[in-house]
Image (tube, grey):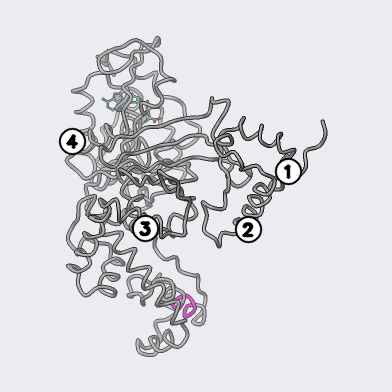
Amino acid sequence: MQQSWNSDRRLTAIGRADLSVPARQALADRQLAPGRSVLDYGCGRGGDVRALERLECRVSGWDPYFRPETPPAPSDVVLLTYVLNVIEDPSERRRTLERAWDLTSTVLIVSARLTWEKSKVRGKEFGDGLLTSRQTFQHLFGASELRSYVEDVTGARIVSASPGIVYAFKDEEARLSYLARRIVPDAEWLSSEDTASAITALVDYVERRGRPPRIEEVPRSTAELLAHLKPNELKRLVRDSSDADKVTESAKRTTLSTLLYLAVELFNGRGPFTSLPLSVQLDVRSFFTSYKEACRRSDRLLLKLRDDGYVRGAMNASSIGKLTPTALYVHRRAVDRMPTILRLYEHCASIAAGRPQEWTLAKLKHQGRAVSWLDYPDFDKDPHPRILSSYQVDLQSLETSHLSYAASANRPLLHRKHEFLTQDDPDAIRYRRLTNSEVKAGLYKHPHLIGTESGWEAELIRCGRELRGHRLVRRAAS
Ligand SMILES: C[S@@+](CC[C@H](N)C(=O)[O-])C[C@H]1O[C@@H](n2cnc3c(N)ncnc32)[C@H](O)[C@@H]1O
């Protein structure tokens, strides 16, 4: 096809051996579910199309240079992967996004390269981007620029899946189910082969959700195994076999998760009761007097997020995470155990800016509202993990920033690892034991010296100690 492009866009399409990051994210988020048709719009050499075909997705691809023959087909899911970056003409860029949106019936997944990759792209200024020596164009987006651009063009409510990947939902039900899955993960059902194991699975569900399921929530195979029992008989069996304390505890937890969901939903734009996923509707019916009451309570929760005193109080009272003069730091394994207001804080930030795919600690500031996700790839292996990157979103301005420490010779590192975890974390005892021996050896006497790799190493030498895994030993004479 003859193109009148002012840059050599075809050269931006790389050969992919594996699925792209956005396609992987969409798979993990169950947006490429088997029943949905998928269009890869601007598919380049078609690497994602082939990989998705291998995964038995109903997928087609269209590209103005590589696959112009068959016109793009309207589809449930449209992927627009790293296309907007390479279009040098802003009005064509906008039209391309509009076209992709027109072709979408459920969700449009837009990804773009972000400004934090600036150092990897060299070229001379051209329009609102850069023209490289190969004559390819790149407009790098700020994470919040991408979100508001897609919002502006589509008029849809946008959810950030991760930095540089946003979902624009055309189907409200699909948006609400996605949010629900992110916030209140579906209770997994134990597998069952006979009536006894089906009853066990049912009891387990009740103990974990705090209420009995409706028939539509029960997996078909389990429902069939229970079909010969009368509803009252089943009710009695569940009542007699379930642990009442567990059910009460779970009812409390589900109530808070429902509030959290409704508050996040308000943050992202609230829909009517009937558009909520069935399980959330049933949670609302079981644990609140009405949807109105549930909304009133969740609105109050969202309002409290603005109250510094309240948020600070929740951080002080929480036994989860490490509180410093500026922020609360919590390990990924412990975030769901934070008080609801703090979970809401972290969720709102993630809906606005997208949690990065790799992160270890969440940092919640207590003055102002900003969340960072910090990546310590060797958190579990390294007794004093070194930071690799941080990604921050300011909830007031929605501005994001990214910092990479990959090239830094003297990286910040962590101490007292157990403080980021819950007390019942399987590794907490081992980490605490190490901290105690480090304190005893005098390693924490000069806290201002030990925050970075070289300062810490110098203190280890001064104290005549070295680390063997998570054990502190006397330093061998050199
Ligand atoms: C960086 S490549 C991305 C290819 C593919 N999506 C991937 O991630 O592997 C950009 C692609 O956008 C395509 N493209 C350029 N202008 C376009 C437009 N107006 N509409 C749709 N695709 C376009 C190019 O042909 C090129 O294959």
Compared to residue 330, the image places residue 214 above or below, namely: below
Residue at the image point whose x is 57% and y is 53% from the top: 418
Report which residue position mark 2 lands on.
429
Start-end of magenta stretch:
198-203
The mark closer to the camera, 3 or 1, is: 3
In this rendering, would 299 be left or right of 432?
left
Amino acid beneath label 4: Asp
Which of the image's four quarters has the N terminus? top left
The answer to the question of whether label 2 and label 1 lie on touching residues, with beta carbons closer than 8 A, is no
Crowdedness near tag 1: few (<14), some (14–19) or many (≥20) residues, C-alpha within 10 Å: few
Q: Which residue is mark 1?
A: 468
As drawn, is 132 to the left or to the right of 193?
Answer: left
Q: What distance separates the C-alpha of mark 1 from that of mark 4?
A: 55 Å
Say whether disc 2 or disc 1 marks the residue closer to the N-terminus. 2
Q: Nearer the viewer, residue 220 or 329?
A: 329
Q: Amino acid at mark 2?
A: Ile
Residue designated by label 3: 314
User: Cβ–Cβ below 8 Å for labels 1 and 4?
Assistant: no
User: Amino acid under label 3?
Assistant: Ala
Q: Which tag is nearer the camera, tag 4 or tag 3? A: 3
In the image, residue 106 lies at what x, y percent?
A: 25, 48
Q: Quadrant of the C terminus?
A: top right
Q: Quadrant of residue 327?
A: top left
Q: Which residue is mark 4?
A: 152
Q: Earlier in the sequence, mark 3 or mark 1?
A: 3
Q: CA distance from mark 4 to mark 3?
A: 36 Å
**Disc 1 element:** strand
**What's the distance in space between the residues labelled 3 and 2, CA to CA?**
25 Å
